[in-house]
Amino acid sequence: MTGKVSCFADLDELSEAAASFVSDRSDAAISERGHFTIALAGGSTPRRLYEILASPAWAKRISWGRWQVFFSDERLVELSDERSNFRMANETLLNQVPLPSKNVHSVPVDVTDSRKVAEQYEASIRRTFEQPDTVPRFDLILLGLGSDGHTASLFPGKPALTESQRLVVDSEPGVLPPPVPRITFTFSLINAAHSVLFLVAGEDKRKAFRAAILGSTGNADTVPAARVRPTDGTLDWYIDSTAKP
Ligand code: 6PG
């Protein structure tokens, strides 16, 4: 299942549609399970979506107190660092809405050993889901796409791509900036989700998007995003007109 592709005129239109997508998934999850577990994407593309979700029109529609927020990857820098995915999400959304701080699970970046950071983050996910033995199923995982075909911090040719047991691993920097150590969700955790939504905008993503959609899962080494194939969940791609092949 390579997913459903929706193309929008520009990033603004894409982000408005993504806000509706997130709100609908939140309503459905809260109605079915009493809460909404979401993993936010990093990078710059989701910024507009987060700003829209924090706007009065949307903010009043969402039951923020039922949300549990994680990050599908993080750069191992101070949370106040401008390269931090947490900082971007916090500035645009998390500290703009009545989301209890205990429900925002930032990555313990103060731990010096990146493997330990990944282990601690995985443990916090398992604690929140209260599922020590099975793979937790996020209601929604948001992902971006790098022009090199990476997603989260699953970079071409890196060891994290072949991890089959752990849910969160440490990841060496890829070729794209910023060249800092990271932690990332693995394919095991991503593909267990009820729903995965990619946000892709920009002409520089066109080649990677085409490869990710058309590519077989066998070419994960060159196009990691091609390995995102939810086992029992939905896969949606929201792209803008410049990313359309
Ligand atoms: C990261 C991101 C990364 C991002 C893509 C797209 O921490 O680097 O999670 O996977 O989503 O690189 O980034 P842009 O949205 O900035 O193009």
Image (cartoon, rainbow, N blue to C red):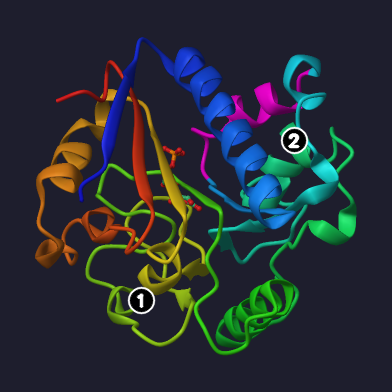
Front residue (pair 131, 104): 131
Query: Disc 2 marks which residue?
Result: 93
Q: Earlier in the sequence, mark 2 or mark 1?
A: 2
Residue type (three-letter) at the residue carrying disc 2: Leu
Residue type (three-letter) at the residue carrying disc 1: Ala
Q: Is residue 102 left or right of residue 15?
A: right
Residues drawn in magenta? 43-55
Residue drawn at (67%, 72%), measured in percent from left and top? 129
Q: Is residue 84 visible?
A: no
Residue 216, given in percent of the width and then of the height, sits at 10, 57
Q: Is residue 183 left or right of residue 107?
A: left
Residue 87, given in percent of the width and then of the height, sits at 72, 47
26 above or below 54? below
Residue 45, given in percent of the width and then of the height, sits at 49, 33
Residue drawn at (48%, 68%), measured in percent from left and top? 185
Q: Is residue 224 left or right of residue 8?
A: left
Q: Residue furthest front?
A: 32
Q: Quadrant of the C terminus?
A: top left
Q: Is residue 211 visible?
A: yes
Where residue 10 sits, quadrant-wise, is top left
* Residue 160 - label: 1
Q: Secondary structure at mark 2?
A: helix
Q: In front: mark 2 or mark 1? A: 2
Residue 227, given in percent of the width and then of the height, sits at 24, 61
The crowding category of the residue bearing disc 1, from other C-alpha atoms within 10 Å (few below 14, some 14 to 19, many at least 20), is: many
Residue drawn at (36%, 51%), measured in percent from left and top? 176
Q: Report how far apart the C-alphas of labels 2 and 1 lie in the structure.
A: 29 Å
Q: Secondary structure at mark 1?
A: helix
The crowding category of the residue bearing disc 2, from other C-alpha atoms within 10 Å (few below 14, some 14 to 19, many at least 20), is: many
Residue drawn at (73%, 54%), measured in percent from left and top? 35
Whether disc 2's CB lies below 8 Å from ligand 1 is answered no
Chief SS of the magenta region: helix
